[in-house]
Amino acid sequence: MNIIVNGKPCTIRSATLADALVELGYGDARVATARGGDFIPAAARAACQLQEGDVLEILMPMRGG
């Protein structure tokens, strides 16, 4: 399926946001996620079904000073 991740086109096989995070290399990383501008809490990612053309934002906290 073709989606947009952080502004870039991406092709994935995953059907859920939780699976997509693993497929995209985020694994167990602590990230914030949004689909179509709506925040998706970590507890809801496994139930969040992705669709062709979805727009995802995946944000990681930055470290350092």
Image (tube, rainbow, N blue to C red):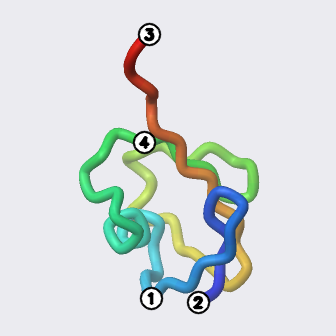
Instruction: Tell me the CA gap for discs 4 and 2.
Output: 22 Å
Percent across and percent down for residue 28 are: 25, 51
**Which numbered tag is attached to residue 13?**
1
Residue lying farthest to the front in this orientation: 65
Instruction: Tell me the CA gap for discs 2 and 1.
Output: 6 Å
Percent across and percent down for residue 20 are: 43, 71
Of callouts 3 and 1, the N-terminal one: 1
Instruction: Tell me the CA gap for discs 1 and 4.
Output: 20 Å
| Amino acid type at image mark 2 | Met
Of callouts 2 and 3, the N-terminal one: 2
Q: Are marks 2 and 1 in contact (CB under 8 Å)?
A: yes
Percent across and percent down for residue 2 are: 64, 85
Q: How crowded is mark 4: few (under 14 residues within 10 Å), some or many (20 or more)?
A: some
Label 4: state its secondary structure.
Answer: loop
> Residue 46, relative to residue 2: is it above or below?
above
Label 1: state its secondary structure.
Answer: loop
- Picture quarter with the N terminus: bottom right
Q: What is the total number of numbered labels drawn onto the structure image?
A: 4
Label 2: state its secondary structure.
Answer: loop
Left or right of 57 in this view: 14: left
**Which numbered tag is attached to residue 59?**
none
Of callouts 4 and 3, the N-terminal one: 4
**Which numbered tag is attached to residue 31?**
4
The residue that disc 3 covers is: 65
| Amino acid type at image mark 3 | Gly
Q: Residues within 10 Å of mark 1 (few under 14, many from 20)?
A: few
From the image, state whether disc 3 or disc 1 is nearer to you. 3
- Picture quarter with the C terminus: top left
**Which numbered tag is attached to residue 1?**
2
Q: Are marks 4 and 3 in contact (CB under 8 Å)?
A: no
Left or right of 28 in this view: 6: right
Of callouts 1 and 4, the N-terminal one: 1
